[in-house]
Amino acid sequence: MDLRLSHEEQLVVATFRRFADVEMRKVAAEADRLGAAPAGFERAAREQLGVGLDAVPLDAGGLCEGAYSHVARVLRGFELGRGCPALAALLEAPVDVALALGRFGRAGARAVLDAMAAGARATSASDGARRLVVKAAGDALVISGTLPAVPALAGASHLLLLAHAEAPVVLLLDAASFAREPMVPSAWRAAAWARATLSEVRVPAERVLARGAAPAREVLAWIRLSLSARAVGAGDAALAYAAAYAADRVQFGRPIGRFESLARLLDHGETLMLAARMMVLRAALLLDQSDGDAAREAACDAVSRARDFTTEALSRVSVDAVQVHGGYGFVNDFPVEKLMRDARAFDAVTGDEAFERVLARTARPLAMEVA
């Protein structure tokens, strides 16, 4: 198996690494303090790099021609997560909406894609905890309930919602159809979070993009794969900051990074993040190559396990990075404090993969287990 990146993939990495270093890191601390992205940040990313347009078809004003590359998306996700997880969440939010519209879109999808190509913000949410009540009303669905916190929902024009009626459904909602309450949590503070309250929101049949477990799992896999890639980038950033601090900080006549305990800590973190990177790349490759229900199911499972592992790895290395800094690690003058807070959002968004896999396994018929 050849693990080398192609010339185009190397170009993606170099381009987004430069953007992360120059455009994201210099504003990350201030965006976190203010709880908002800099004015024009999303527009600049869209114009310079095509972020948010790469999943919009060419005929709708986007850049997507042919099959979408999830490998390319995770390669850029590594770099965006390394730059700033909150700002990366804003940039990646529209992609899953555009992919769903391209994959399942019905009447009216073109108008939404046109709006997204023109710069409209869109985002997605999964009601994994089943807080929403979804009832059939003829061909339409009626939804009531509350979604507690959704990144990029403040100011969004549309919400791609994964919910559960009698079976899982993939819906597209106009944001004007429900109430939103902007919020600034401790993690991803600049990611334009909002709570959503839906009161008898009617979703017409043309906005019910798909029904059934398989399409819902596929959309969830896209969202989770991007989260996994950005988590790897955030973990790499935390380790790099910790290693730099350990090389500069001198105690007892030598840099603290030369003490065996800290050297082992950093080395273990590097092993975790390398394993996480490989899991994410493998999951992306399987998703790109999935052809047929069985292959798609295997790819979704690989994505779920990759996301589960990467969030645990990020939680570990971000805490360890703070420990390397000692008491300074808890001061927001140092970026590892922000990364430790940001790690919590990766673990919270879209639900608990491990629990879902356990439920699926225990629900199988005994004969399948024996076989």
Image (cartoon, rainbow, N blue to C red):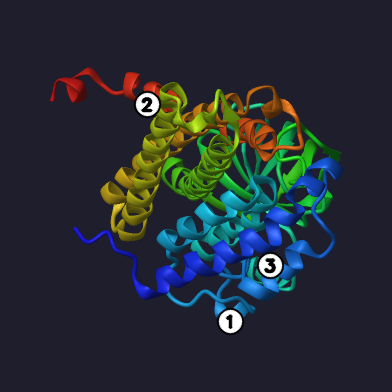
For the N terminus, give its image quadrant.
Answer: bottom left
Give percent across and percent down for residue 211: 50, 46
The residue type indicated by label 3 comes to Ala
Give percent across and percent down for residue 155: 82, 53
Total marks placed = 3
Query: At x 53% / y 43%, what residue is drawn?
Result: 240
Name which of mark 1 and mark 2 comes first in the sequence: 1
Give percent across and percent down for residue 316: 50, 27
For the C terminus, give its image quadrant.
Answer: top left
The residue type indicated by label 2 comes to Ala
The residue type indicated by label 1 comes to Asp
Q: CA distance from mark 3 to mark 1?
A: 21 Å
Nearer to us in this view, 205 or 212:
212
Query: Could you tell me which secondary element the residue under label 1 belongs to?
Result: helix
User: Decide: marks 2, 3 in contact (CB < 8 A)?
Assistant: no
Q: Which residue is mark 2?
A: 360
- Say whether residue 118 is left or right of residue 128: right
Q: Which residue is mark 1?
A: 59
Q: Residue furthest left?
A: 371
- Say whether residue 240 is left or right of residue 274: right
User: Decide: marks 3, 1 in contact (CB < 8 A)?
Assistant: no
Name which of mark 3 and mark 1 comes first in the sequence: 3
Q: Which residue is mark 3?
A: 45
